[in-house]
Image (cartoon, helix red, strand yellow):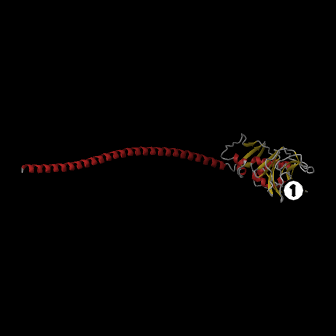
Amino acid sequence: MFNIFSTTKNEKLNDEIKTLTEQLTKEKNTCNQQIKLIRDFKEREDLLEIRKLELDEKERNIDDLVNNKYSILENKLQEREKYAELLIQKITKNNENQDKQITLNIGGKLFCTTIDTLTKTKETFFSAMFSNYFNTKPNEKGEYFIDRDPSYTDIIIDYLRDEDVIYRINNMSQVAKQKLISDINFYGVMEMMSIIPQLILNIFIDGNFQYFTVDFLVFPHISWEVIISTDQYINQYEEGFYIGMCNNLNYKYGFSVSNRSKYTPYVIPEISCYSGKKLSYPYMDSSARQKTILVIYNSRKQILTFSSDYNSFKIKNVPSNFTPFVYCKSNFSAHITNLKQLF
C-alpha cells in the first residue's frame, strides 16, 4: 500500500511542477514581450526626440532665412522709396521749368521758345534732350547749344507751336525741301512728314515699255512694287520681262532682273545691262501666273534691290539719274503700284 501511494503522490507532484513550469514559462515570455515593447517604445521615443531636435534646427534655419530675406527686401524697399522720392522731386522741378522760356543756339542762331513747346511731340530729339534721363545744362550764357545748320529750324519750331507751315514748305525749292527733310529726320519730328508733298506716280507707256519718274533729290529712298501676270506657260530659257532702272529711255540701257533662272548681260537686244551677276533662283517659275516683285532704290548709297518671296538680289553703283522701268513681251503684262518714300 505504501509504494502505491508514494508513486501516486510523486506523479501528482510532477504534474504540479510541470504546470507551474509551463505557467512560469508563459509569464516569462509575457515579461520578455513586455520588456521588448518597452525597449521598442524607448527606441521610438529616442528617435522622436532626435527628429524633434532636427525639426527644431530646421525651424531655426527657416526663421533665420526668412528674417534675412525680410531684411534684404526691407532694405530694397527703403532704397526704392528714396529713389521714388528723388524722382518725384526731379519731375516736379522739371514740370516747373516746362513753361520757362529758354534759348536755343542752333549753329550760332538764337531761337526763343519753351520746353513745353519743344517736348509737345514725344520721342523726338528735344523730348529726349529735356527728359528726366538727361541732365541737359545751358552754357554760361544760358543757351542750349546744338551744332546744326539753323536755316530751317524755325519751320520745325513753328510746326511745334501749331502754326501753319504748309504754305512755306510748298514754296520752298527742291533743294531746300531736301534739307528740311534732313532736319526733320535729325530732330525726329517724324509726324511733320505728313505735311511734306507726297510722291506722285506718273507712269508712261511706250509699247511694251513702262516707266515712271521720281524726284530723287527730294525723296532719295523709295520703294515700289511690280505685279507681273501671264496666262501662258513660262519658258525659263526665254526672257519674258525685265524690271530695273535705265539711263536712256530710247536705248533702254541699265540695270535689271528678269524671269530667267540666270541673269546674262549684253545678249538681250531690248535691254542691255551693266552687271554680270547671276541669280540663284528665278523671279518667276513655269507654274506661276502672277508674281509681285518689290524694288527698293537708295540714291544716297546708289543701291538697287529686288525682292520676291525668299529671293533677293542687290545691284550697287546705280546712278540716281536713272529711270525705273518695266519691259514685258507680248505674253506678259505688268502693273507698277504701291510707290512709297522711305526715311
Residue 145 is situated, as x and y percent measured from the top left of the image, at 74, 42
- 291 vs 209, left or right, is left
> Could you classify mark 1 by the number of other residues whose Cα lies within 10 Å: few (under 14), some (14-19), or many (20 or more)?
few
- Can residue 237 be seen by looking at this rendering? yes
Question: Residue furthest toward the bottom?
Answer: 231
Question: Residue furthest toward the right?
Answer: 250
Which quadrant of the figure has residue 163? Answer: bottom right
Residue 100 is situated, as x and y percent measured from the top left of the image, at 70, 49
**Residue at image coords 41%, 43%:** 57
- Residue linked to disc 1: 202
Circle 1 SS class? strand
Residue 209 is situated, as x and y percent measured from the top left of the image, at 89, 55
Q: Please tell me which residue lies in front, 308 or 240.
A: 240
**Residue at image coords 74%, 45%:** 103
**Residue at image coords 59%, 47%:** 84
- Can residue 153 be seen by looking at this rendering? no
**Residue at image coords 40%, 44%:** 54
